[in-house]
Image (cartoon, rainbow, N blue to C red):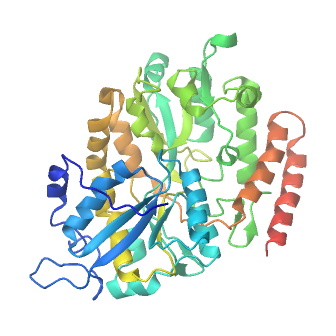
Amino acid sequence: MSKKKVTVLAGMSLLVGLMAGCGSNSDNGPTPSPGNGNGNGNGEPPVAEVVLRVAHWTPTNLMAPVIEAYEEANDGVTIEYVELSDNGDSVAGMQRLDLLMASGENLDVVFMPGATDYSQRAGLGLLAPLNELMATEGMDLNETYLLDPSIDGTVFALPDTLENYFVLLNKDMLDAAGLEVPTEWSWDEYLDYAEKLTSGSGASTVYGTYFHTWPMYWQLAQINQMNANNLFTDGQLNVDSPEIRQSLELRSKAEEAGIATPYADTISQKLAYRSEFFSERAAMIVTGNWMIDESGGSEQFPATFTTAFAPMPSNDKGQPAGVSIANGNFAAILDRSSNKEAAYDFIRWHSTEGGELKNVYSAWRQQDANQFIRGVKEHALSPDFIDEDSLTYVMTHFQAAPLNVPPSYQSQLEQAYTTQTELFILGQQDLETTISKTEAEVRAIVDANQ
């Protein structure tokens, strides 16, 4: 890929003006290390010019105002942006990134769209440890961010965005059924809601809920736990567990009661969660915060009803709702970069003030939820269809489980798990056989990778 310097776009003067004075030397941002090439706004001359090559899957036109704002606030720093995907496809972006790194491309900063992508590249020795840079700055990771991406005590990336899970609900259907938007509820109550929200018959059935095909939908009573919330964590298998059993029984009960879209239909018709929810064929879906922007409508799925938000259910009544595993995008410095101090300053800014500029759902503890929601509504096609009160509640009552960085072979574990659990939901094997076979397959994968 050819080197690109992001050009200044017309109409960005207001945006740059908003960011003036809130670069890396603000009260909330990082303190630049000596010699990082940044001007500090106090009359001192800038150090030598620094060129940072930054790779991300976000299209250039969307990253341009962010990069321009950083350059404007940091004299002597030039960002050369390497666009990994022209349509925002993070999977294709990671494939492109790996090709560039394998060919020896000169990059300083790279972004990764999840803990699995992060752990794989850290495991290959491609990412620079950040502990010394953090110590020099005096930054406490856990006081600054909601996620701690440490791997065996070493931090190889900063959490750039936050991904967590909650429930989207069709509020119009709730109102028609006389149901309140839940704030504290359990999976049993979730199933009760699904039953009351199911209506119609045959091809015109509206199901109370829809469960997608991803592995997390077979782990719903596990991913809402603070600990042991993955198939393999801290050297321990968590397959033969009460949480996995409850997860599978939850799916089975919903199928048997006819209150969830049949899984056989989901895979045979290649159904998707967006279309099922926004086309009003399902009243509730468990999903992640990337759907907040879409709740106000999109060109593909215009908003035709009010979307409400509810926290993740608990496993039993009386337990706290709103607990969820957390993930997100991660910003790292390549180990071979010769501009590590300047690169560190950029990823600190991008993961804090830069995130607010982009109005992303951030892992930064100081993110202003009200400001974020205002930004979402300002850009929404149909902002009145976003239930602001319930969204505010979910954002401010979310409890992030500690990040368990998955092993580099996580995809193998998930494939083995999904293959066996699908057989259970389709009625081709019983629960105990499913647990036994899954435990054996997952253990074999772990042992092969030790």
| Foreground of the two, 185 or 76 | 76
Residue extending furthest toward the front:
2
Residue 131 image offset from top left, x and y in percent: 46, 84
| Foreground of the two, 135 or 324 | 135
Q: Is residue 406 left or right of residue 39?
A: right
Quadrant holding the C terminus: bottom right
Which of the 4 quarters of the picture holds residue 76? bottom left
Q: Is residue 419 left or right of residue 9?
A: right
Residue at horizontal 42 percent and vertical 24 percent from the top: 302
Residue at horizontal 73 percent and vertical 51 percent from the top: 244
| Foreground of the two, 216 or 25 | 25
Question: Looking at the image, how many numbered discs can be counted on the residues?
Answer: 0
Residue at horizontal 83 percent and vertical 46 percent from the top: 420
Q: Is residue 193 above or below residue 438?
A: above
Task: Using the rendered image of the protein, determine whether residue 443 is visible from the camera's viewpoint.
Answer: yes
Residue 152 image offset from top left, x and y in percent: 60, 80
Residue at horizontal 15 percent and vertical 63 percent from the top: 20
Residue 213 image offset from top left, x and y in percent: 69, 39
Q: Is residue 37 above or below residue 287?
A: below
